[in-house]
DNA sequence: CTTCTTTTCTACGTGCTGTAGAATATGTCC
DNA sequence: GGACATATTCTACAGCACGTAGAAAAGAAG
């Protein structure tokens, strides 16, 4: 599920400032001068996409990211890798393109 | 630049059957019963997106993928990774999620 | 009950994609 | 070269996702 620019901005905001937020807080933190209804529409769409969860206990409702930015991004990576028949071949090209320092980091992360 | 379903099918075809193809060949190889003009429209759009190159020397024109599926996919991966502030953190989560056999493959690819 | 706040419904413009007919350009055969 | 076949471009439209927000409804507060 691809995100539009505003949806992406909202997610970035929720990731950068954790803790559930009200629509008005999101609106005030976002750049630009959007109507609250706009923010609510976007939050609802993100909720339907499974990226945002809502605490609708008492008003105003609070919204927060379902998963971390990192986990979400890993999901995207796997989605991309799943669209290709030879995952390994893509990883090979990818690893061939990263810098030496990053390669070292990868080795370390794999418990060298 | 995201691809639609038909655009994706055409790219898969061009990747799976290398060598430049005419629009009619593409049409005949694609599933479904599309008009040639449809295929030509899609090929033109893919050309504009930089994914397809056309040899317009003599008619019928021949179309082929600009880069390999692997290179294109690596581009997508880097695009995803570029949308995040801490690339390393994402890689960490990604590597943590791959199987042991794939981890071994990665180590090997990094010139263990 | 009246008023304010919050949320939902509804709506519209825009851009992308799938789809293809109409119009045009190019090649081929007598 | 003219008629016919083939290929390409133009134009168009429907559907969907997204940005955007007003109108309407639902809930809270005094």
Image (spheres, coloured by chain):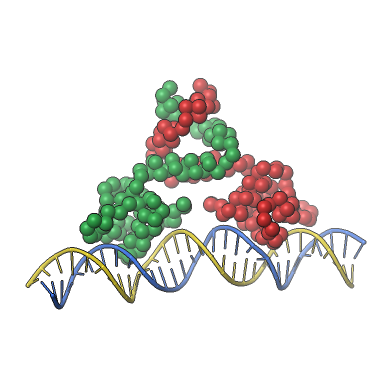
Chain colours: A red, B green, C yellow, D blue
Q: In this view, does A3 lie above or below B110?
A: below
Which residue is at 56% across, 52% downward? A3
Camera-side residue: B74 or B56?
B56
Q: Quadrant of residue C30?
A: bottom left
Can see residue A109?
Answer: yes
In the image, residue B94 above or below residue C10: above
Name the residue nearer the viewer: A44 or A16.
A16
Q: How many marks?
A: 0
The residue under the point 67% across, 46% down is A14
Question: Does residue A88 show up?
Answer: no
On screen, residue B75 above or below D28? above
The percent coordinates of residue C23 (x first, y second) are: 31, 75
- Image spot of residue A111 (x, y percent): 53, 23
Where is residue A18 shown, x and y percent of the image? 70, 42
The answer to whether residue A89 is left or right of residue A58 is: left
In the picture shown, does residue A75 fall above or below B41? Answer: above
Q: Position of residue C20 (x, y in %)?
A: 35, 69
User: Would residue A11 be found to the left or right of residue A109 on screen?
Assistant: right
Quadrant for residue B10, please give it. Answer: bottom left
* Near-viewer residue (C22 or B101): C22
């Amino acid at each position: 599920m691809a995100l539009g620019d505003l949806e992406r901005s909202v997610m970035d905001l929720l990731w950068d400032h954790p803790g559930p937020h009200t629509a008005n807080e999101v609106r005030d933190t976002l750049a630009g001068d959007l109507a609250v209804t706009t923010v609510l529409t976007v939050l609802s769409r993100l909720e339907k996409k499974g990226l945002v969860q809502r605490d609708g206990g008492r008003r105003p409702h609070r919204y927060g990211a379902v998963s971390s930015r990192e986990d979400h991004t890993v999901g995207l990576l796997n989605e991309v890798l799943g669209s290709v028949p030879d995952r390994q071949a893509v990883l090979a090209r990818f690893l061939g393109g990263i810098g030496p320092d990053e390669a070292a980091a990868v080795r370390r992360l794999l418990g060298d």
